[in-house]
Image (spheres, rainbow, N blue to C red):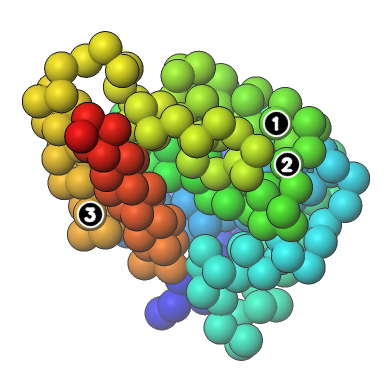
Amino acid sequence: MSLWSRITDALAALGSGENLSAVFDRLRTRPERSVAFAIAVIALGAKMAKADGKVTRDEVAAFRDVFQIASEDEAGAARVFNLARTDIAGYREYARRIRRMFINDPETLCDLMEGLFHIAVADGQYHPGEDRFLADVADIFGLSKAQFRTLRARFVPDAPRDPYAVLGVTPGMPRDEIRKVWRRLVRENHPDRMMARGVPREAIKLAEKRLIDINRAWDDISASAV
């Protein structure tokens, strides 16, 4: 059964009277957490669409890019998006539910934030409303301000391209220590590690981009020492 078929099954519970919170609770355990991850990105992405007042084709394409949605599954993805967009629940309620779901897995919350950043900047602009939205969601998720700055440095076109921020280190750290951080990040962000945490295969492109950014940051830092 495909990810989107499983999402459709999860949404069928909503049609039978089960609320979204109950559906999320039911999806806490593996392997259904991959379904929960996808629903979370769609739901918060739909709420974020209101932050700049519009949903562009680029943003929709970015979402398809993250999840590699097949044509036969587009209707299911659209249903989740429209359900979240029209739901009277605010985005903070969604974010709190998601935080509770992944309370013992902060890495997955970072993965989710990456998906939201990827969608936010897909149209080539980063609206102040999107920045406030993402900063608020990151705070609810328990990400530090430094972690948020790291994400913004990697994704936002106008953000300072600080390789130290990308690695989460400081220029004053010894080079050997920075190298250790870089190697650890490469290990932790291997696609196999992401799938082991329950991130769906459809979202592995996020890990691929992250590894590119991590390695580029290390290359920039190494070059500056020459």
**Helix, strand or loop status at disc 2:** loop
Label 2, label 3: how far apart the Cα atoms are = 28 Å
Image height of 159 relative to 7, above or below: above
- Seen at 50% across and 35% down, the residue is 161
**Helix, strand or loop status at disc 1:** helix
Q: Label 1 is placed on what type of residue?
A: Asp
Query: Which tag is nearer the camera, tag 1 or tag 2?
Result: 2
Place residue 109 in its image quadrant: top left
Residue named by callout 2: 126
- Seen at 65% across and 38% down, the residue is 158
Q: Earlier in the sequence, mark 3 or mark 1?
A: 1
Image height of 215 relative to 135, above or below: below
| Discs 1, 2 touching: Cβ within 8 Å | yes
- Seen at 26% across and 12% down, the residue is 172
Label 2 Cα crowd, 10 Å radius (few <14 / some 14-19 / many 20+): some
Label 1, label 2: how far apart the Cα atoms are = 7 Å
Place residue 160 in its image quadrant: top right
Q: In screen coordinates, is 167 left or right of 21?
A: left
On residue 56, the disc is none
Residue 83 image position (x, y, % from top left):
76, 56
Residue 68 image position (x, y, % from top left):
51, 74
Q: Nearer the viewer, residue 21 or 155?
A: 155
Q: In screen coordinates, is 32 left or right of 181?
A: right
Residue named by callout 1: 131
Residue 197 image position (x, y, % from top left):
27, 49
Q: Nearer the viewer, residue 151 or 84?
A: 151
Label 3, label 1: how far apart the Cα atoms are = 28 Å
Q: How many marks?
A: 3
Residue named by callout 3: 190
